[in-house]
Amino acid sequence: MSRLLDLARQPLLVALALIVVLLIVGELLSPGFASPTQIMRLLIVAALLGIVAAGQNLVILGGREGIDLSVGGVVSLSAIIAGNLMNGQDAGIPLAILGCIATGALFGLANGLGVTLLRIPPLVMTLGMLGVLQGLLVVIRQGIPSGRAAPGLSQFVTQPFLFGLPGIIWLWVAIGLLLAFLLSRTVYGYRVYAIGSNEQAARMAGVPVAAMRVSLFVLSGVFAAIAGICLLGYSGSSFANVGEQYMLPSIIAVVFGGTSLAGGKGGYTGTMAGAMMLTVLQGILTTVNIDESGRQMIFGATLLLLMLFYGRGRAMRA
Amino acid sequence: MVDAVAKPPREPGSVKRFIERYPFLPALAIMLLLLALNGIWQPRSVSLVGITGLVKTYMALMLLAVAQTYVVYAGDIDLSAGAIVSLVNVVIVAAMAAMGDSGFSVIAAMAIGLGVGLACGLVNGVVVATFRLQAIVATFATSIFFTGLALWIMPVAGTPAPATFWRAYGGRILEIPFVFWAAAVLALILYLLARTRLALQLLAVGDDAQGAYQSGLPVTAIRMRGYALCGLFAALAAFCVTGDTASGDPLVGGKMTLFSVAAVVLGGSALAGGYGTVVGSVFGALIIGLINSLVYFVGTPSEWQNLVQGLAILVALMAGILVGRRARS
Amino acid sequence: MAKLKISGARKAYGATMALSRGDLELQAGEVHVLIGSNGSGKSTLCKIVAGSVKPDSGDVVLDGKAVTVEGPRAAKALGIGIFYQELSLAARRTVEENICLPDLSMNGPFVDRTALSERAGRYIALFEGVAGEGFAADARVDALRADQRQLVEIMKALATEAPVLIFDEPTSALDRAQVDRFFEILRRLKTEGRAMVFISHRMDEIFAIGDRVTVLRDGRTVGSSRIADTSPQEVVRMMVGEEPSLAAAAPQASVANEAKRPLALSVSALAGPGFTDVAFDVRQGEILGLGGLHGQGQSAVLRALFGAAPVTAGSVTLDGAAYRPANPRAAIRAGLAYVSGDRGRDGVIHGRTILENVTPIHFLRNGLKLASPSALRAKATPAVDALKTKFAGFSHPIGSLSGGNQQKIVIARWLIDRPGVLLLDDPTKGIDLSAKADLFALVRKLAAEGMAIVLYSSEDAELLANSDRILVFNGGRIRRSLQGAERTRFNLYEAAYEAA
């Protein structure tokens, strides 16, 4: 019994179990929901959120109230830059990838420097940066067309590529493996957890705390940029503020994956499950025949209910 | 050589001590500077009509920033504040539509609106303080729920508010614009609230929750009351939104949440809790308004306005934090 | 009838037993001293009485009635007030607000500022003349010195006017005059019939103010006696139990070839916040002790050398080369190691595994990029074994270990790649006796193998037993250097208390 309880406290297992339950519920409510095609579609959507959440995850793991509210803006910006750089031509894809990653890294760098050099709280810094990004989007949108995805990119995101799964899912899996390796088998990963758990102790043990933190924000920008490119491939062309829908869900996916918002505890595997869980939940709500208001209410209430499984704060009286 | 050990704590300079006591002073200075700049580029903007327009447009954000401040006092945050505004907006518009255009219906609708705001605040208080969920994610979830409720009450924007309501909001009493009366009442309420036990307790909880608990303060109840107060002020903000836009819109407040957080930071309050003033947040909201109008007055091409506004707010946020820290250190 | 009686109080945090059997019987009109080494469970016992820690079991009887203290609010209602060792102050509120915060004076719906000031003023007046410069009713607590903050916490506890008052180390930062004033107040409260618990590590204070003493050791109450019927030696014997004396293995000061050994660290005219004009040499294989009263600059010097605190003047030579302390990273690369006594703040990476806690220095010293757990385990095992660390496995969380073993892991991280100079900043604070013995056995072995060691300890016995030479600090300066036979408790005290 207590072993069972221990299992129930493993966020990854909880998330996976909930995904299965949600899939069954979806199938019961709307036969065909859990069909292979549908699941693949859900996986593609989950991969987009999951890639954004990868960067968010790293920033949160690094602690000191780490959070990146600007990811949504970077996703939108990246989508529009990619659309223009490739402009429907496969030949433009490499340049688009380079351009977008550089852009994402640049904004991440700005966030990171603000947080470390000027010691602006991450919430404030990235909130301000979000405002800048939104303004920048308006400017770009006036100057240039929205741009089109190259056929190769669309194919990569939506069409089967290997073993019947599209390239984006393989990309997501690769990112998952990469981060699992990074966090558990490299010095960098050990240091991420160290600064997230006890920044002062990490500094006393020779960890370059500021450089680490900047690098986490840069990675967050880069992952958001990659997600932006993929999003362009998914929708064909970019449209205004397409990335905004990822800002807070990326944080929720991280929390549902068992990463503590206090930092230093958690990992990306759980976040992947968290992203999948959020996507399946939203998938069910769009499938069943209720109107938008009901959907949102159920979504909000379910999120709250699920949160009770995770990271409840410490009681004052221990 | 000076013996470093026996040195008493550094006597803070008078300016520093002043800022320490009145954390909103940097915000006030930035606000006055922006007001002056507005006046230079567009003299009419500092006329009675200009100021009235500014206050009328930004009264809602001022109130929402105040709402946000009470939870920030205790080290919490409310990302559902804007959704509460939306919900109260559609509730009162729907209520007034149902009850007809009369003074009674306006007052009854506002009473209902305050009740809804309070209820939303209590829901947030329960999930954050009682259930101990992380404030950022939990209030995001409640914001989705509140938005859903707003959409259920009014699926599409556009139901007009009765003329009695918006005429009063845009009108004058004894030749003085209504919004100034509202601002005066707000100032009085804020002054009185600042003298209550709750204000002091919220700040003590935000300063050191464990210490406050160990001192025998009912920390959970105090945080809950902070959220309740936030809900009430969000409802007041919704009244202003309704007066300004004269219609119901289930998504009208969504964009305001993050601006309310920005206004709190601009006003000199610490997001970590324990330090700040509501007056500062009011100034913070006006700073955002003045930046927006200044960007317009200096003739920024329309497509560049958002970017310049965003940059200016980012710079103001950073400057505010740096100045505040320097003053305190 | 006892005013307050606690029996069989027990509290465990995971694997760590904070209190295994706490008993205490408190009479009205007495000052009851609670004593025990760090980590013996005194604070836990106090917090259980004050409601801020929930006991696993145990009974509390107040005025003959069994009560359950549900929380600090309930304790307040029952008439129990407490001074918290770690303080419970709101740093950005004023002195008077803090004093009255638990029970604000109200005027209708509003805080009655006049009544509040008046009430707080009564308690502030108790310490008039000794509170020091800058202490004022409207001063913010974060602008006060450590001793002044402690006074605010005392005033806050007194302001509860509770019949039962608990003072958990209220005098640790106070000066003589402040302590005297505090004792005057306690004596007056005694005549009012209040029941008071008093915790202190200063034996003279205990015998000056106490009526009864209860001793805790390793989480248990081991005895209780009237102060008049006991002696300091007897109390220490009860605190220490049957453990072997630390001083048993005194170092064999190897004076013979001392001068021939090369210099490892040479410091001249070093100054920074908290210390001035500090100069000393440490040779390879030497253990240099830093002594004196707590907080006289010893810790500040060590932190400054390690690059964790600023240096404003002076020069340092490390292994014959000029060294500028810039940050811990540079210090580690230069071959320095630093172990802080505040392991919770400076040492332990909380919530992570033992392996993650033992490896960070190894990464930096070797410029590693990859972390292979099996290879790291193999590297770390000898270091951890050298300290006789008891642990179940490298993949277990650090929090599963006792305080002493946690500190051993933190120390072991420096031993995978041997540093040239080891700086120990009160490394045994709050760890048990056997862990201390293991630690000092290792320190002496390291010195014998040629490592230079600078040791600051707040426990004079440790310092005397383990140092080849002792520099006594007072007021941020080195006042005396004690070598060979001069290393006596008497000389140490004399130099430490000498007027600066």
Image (cartoon, coloured by chain):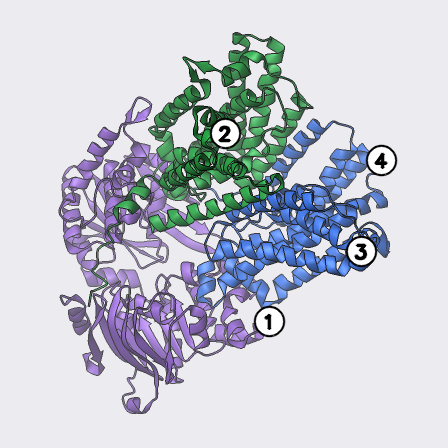
Chain colours: A blue, B green, C purple
Tag 2 and tag 4, C-beta contact below 8 Å = no
Q: Which chain letter matches label 3?
A: A
Callout 2 crowding tier (Cα within 10 Å): few <14, some 14–19, many ≥20:
many
Task: Tell us which disc is closer to us: 2 or 4.
Answer: 2
Residue C341 circle label: none
Callout 4 crowding tier (Cα within 10 Å): few <14, some 14–19, many ≥20:
few
The disc, 3 or 4, on the residue closer to the chain's N-terminal end is 4
Residue type pointed to by label 2: Tyr
* Residue C204 placement: quadrant: bottom left
Q: Which chain letter matches label 1?
A: C
Residue shown at the point (45%, 32%) measured from the top left: B43
Residue type pointed to by label 4: Pro
Residue behind mark 1: C369
Task: Tell us which disc is closer to us: 2 or 3.
Answer: 2
> Element at badge 2?
helix
Residue behind mark 4: A31
Quarter occupied by the C terminus of chain A? top left
| Image location (x, y in percent) of residue B216 | 35, 36
Residue behind mark 2: B58
Name above or below for residue A219 compared with residue A237.
below
Residue shown at the point (67%, 53%) measured from the top left: A225
Residue A167 circle label: 3
Would you say C81 lies left or right of B251 here? left
Q: Is residue C56 visible?
A: yes
| Image location (x, y in percent) of residue A104 | 64, 55
Q: CA distance from mark 2 to mark 1?
A: 53 Å
Residue type pointed to by label 3: Gly
> Element at badge 3?
helix
| Image location (x, y in percent) of residue A147 | 76, 48
Tag 2 and tag 1, C-beta contact below 8 Å = no
Q: Nearer the viewer, residue C229 or C411?
A: C411
Would you say A17 lies left or right of B327 here? right
